[in-house]
């Protein structure tokens, strides 16, 4: 431990010093300790601990991948108050719905590019059912078999399985056979029922979300997990959320990455709720890195946070800044995210990482190294 770090830890309360010692020994902290970090930990203390965990796991590596997004539709039957898409079901004519051919054309437009992943996620449209997506997965795999398909949040899956009257395990098997490789982490929001009732009452609940991820892991596939923070939830709700994810990860080991998503208040039914500060964002990343000891990776999603803040997050536990992404995802720009046209070339990403003296590593979805820079 460096002298400066020792001094920093020595100045803390005995309870915080005890946490620092546990982290130094690679031990897990409990929920109460996690809460104490949020409530009493200074940003410098949290950042220093989180960075020590991050460097123990990944050294200076910062991972990114070359991916593109397809959003089949922005029309959604659900009415999450924080989401701009929820208002579109009543005005379906203002939204978009892509046909199978249109989506395949998006894939074809990347013919000459060395992308490794397509991320497919969108609103929940009643016309787009399980078998529509089976055809989509098969068509993509038939056209470009090496492309990893990371598709459908647990919310979309829950809806399509129920509508097709198949069990979760059957549904997962059907999609896996059609070409699904992993699922993204969306739809988790905040697991606690009292908050869920206020922000996204009509979609799959915590148990349903966790059950789908467990089934995905049991089928030998991986997934990510998100948490929407910085709205009406308390620190205890965040710890409860992370604790439930940590428990499932102990059981299956199938999660790759935890992605805290900052609530943005543009153009939705929660526009009156103020956004949290950058300091809160950095505290969130730090506590996540310290608490989620069995999650290999922590991702800052740069289109939401902005490039400069994503760069800063690399000193607060984050080791992954997602992908190159073209201007193909609208859910955040509509909610007032920093990046209104989220597109970054590999060169831009590499420069961004090198500027803060870290090592850019291109990865595939499962974190196999593609290229070191
Ligand atoms: O679950 C919607 C969020 C999520 C807002 O797995 C909002 O690699 C903030 O999960 N403010 C979907 N967030 C996107 C998602 C994701 C993104 C990037 C990478 C991965 C991955 C997954 O978008 C939703 C919801 O939490 N969202 N509206 C808003 N106003
Ligand atoms: Fe639909 Fe997802 Fe938006 Fe909720 S967050 S309204 S489920 S697109």
Image (spheres, rainbow, N blue to C red):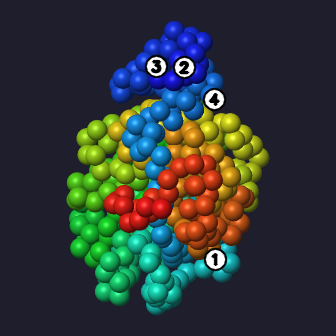
- Of the numbered discs 3 and 4, the one sitting upstream in the chain is 3
Identify residue for label 2.
3
Circles 3 and 4: CB distance less than 8 Å? no
Q: Work out whether 7 lies above or below 328.
A: above
Q: CA distance from mark 3 to mark 1?
A: 49 Å
Within 10 angstroms of label 3, few (less than 14), some, or many (20 or more) residues? many
Q: Which mark is residue 19?
A: 3
Q: Which residue in the structure is indicated by mark 1? A: 95
Rounded to the nearest whole Å, what is the CA distance between mark 4 and mark 2? 18 Å
Say if residue 21 shows up in the picture: yes
| Residue shown at the point (67%, 74%) measured from the top left | 91
Q: Are marks 4 and 2 in contact (CB under 8 Å)?
A: no
Label annotation for residue 43: 4
**Mark 4 against mark 1, which lies toward the viewer?**
4
Q: Earlier in the sequence, mark 4 or mark 1?
A: 4
| Foreground pick, 244 / 318 | 318
- Kindly indicate the quadrant of the structure image that contains residue 161: bottom left
Q: Is residue 263 above or below residue 48?
A: below
Whole-percent x and y of residue 253? Answer: 28, 46
Secondary structure at badge 3 equals helix
């Amino acid at each position: 431990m460096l002298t400066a770090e020792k001094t920093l830890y020595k100045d803390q309360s005995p309870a915080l010093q005890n946490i620092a010692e546990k982290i130094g020994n690679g031990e897990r902290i409990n929920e109460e300790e996690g809460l104490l970090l949020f409530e009493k930990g200074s940003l410098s203390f949290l950042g220093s601990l989180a960075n020590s965990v991050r460097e123990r796991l990944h050294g200076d590596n910062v991972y990114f991948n070359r991916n593109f997004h397809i959003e089949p539709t922005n029309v959604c039957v659900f009415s999450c108050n924080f989401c701009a898409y929820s208002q579109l079901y009543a005005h379906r004519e203002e939204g978009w719905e892509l046909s199978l051919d249109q989506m395949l054309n998006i894939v074809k437009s990347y013919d000459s590019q060395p992308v490794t992943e397509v991320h497919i996620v969108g609103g929940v449209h009643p016309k787009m059912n399980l078998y529509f997506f089976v055809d989509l997965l098969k068509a993509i795999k038939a056209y470009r078999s090496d492309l990893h398909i990371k598709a459908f949040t647990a919310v979309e899956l829950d809806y399509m399985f129920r509508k097709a009257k198949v069990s979760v395990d059957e549904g997962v098997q059907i999609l896996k056979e059609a070409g699904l490789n992993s699922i993204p982490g969306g739809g988790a929001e905040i697991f606690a029922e009292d908050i869920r009732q206020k922000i996204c009452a009509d979609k799959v609940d915590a148990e349903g979300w966790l059950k789908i991820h467990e089934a995905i892991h049991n089928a030998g596939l991986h997934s990510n997990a998100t948490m929407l923070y910085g709205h009406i939830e308390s620190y205890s709700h965040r710890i409860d959320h992370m604790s439930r994810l940590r428990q499932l990860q102990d059981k299956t080991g199938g999660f790759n990455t935890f992605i805290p998503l900052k609530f943005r208040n543009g153009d939705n039914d929660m526009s009156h709720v103020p956004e949290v500060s950058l300091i809160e964002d950095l505290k969130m990343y730090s506590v996540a890195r310290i608490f989620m000891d069995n999650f290999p990776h922590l991702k800052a999603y740069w289109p939401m946070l902005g490039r400069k803040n994503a760069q800063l997050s690399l000193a607060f536990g984050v080791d992954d800044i997602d992908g190159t992404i073209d201007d193909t995802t609208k859910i955040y720009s509509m909610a007032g995210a920093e990046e209104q046209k989220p597109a970054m070339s590999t060169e831009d990403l590499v420069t961004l990482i090198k500027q803060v003296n870290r090592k850019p590593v291109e990865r595939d979805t499962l974190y196999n190294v593609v290229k070191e820079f």
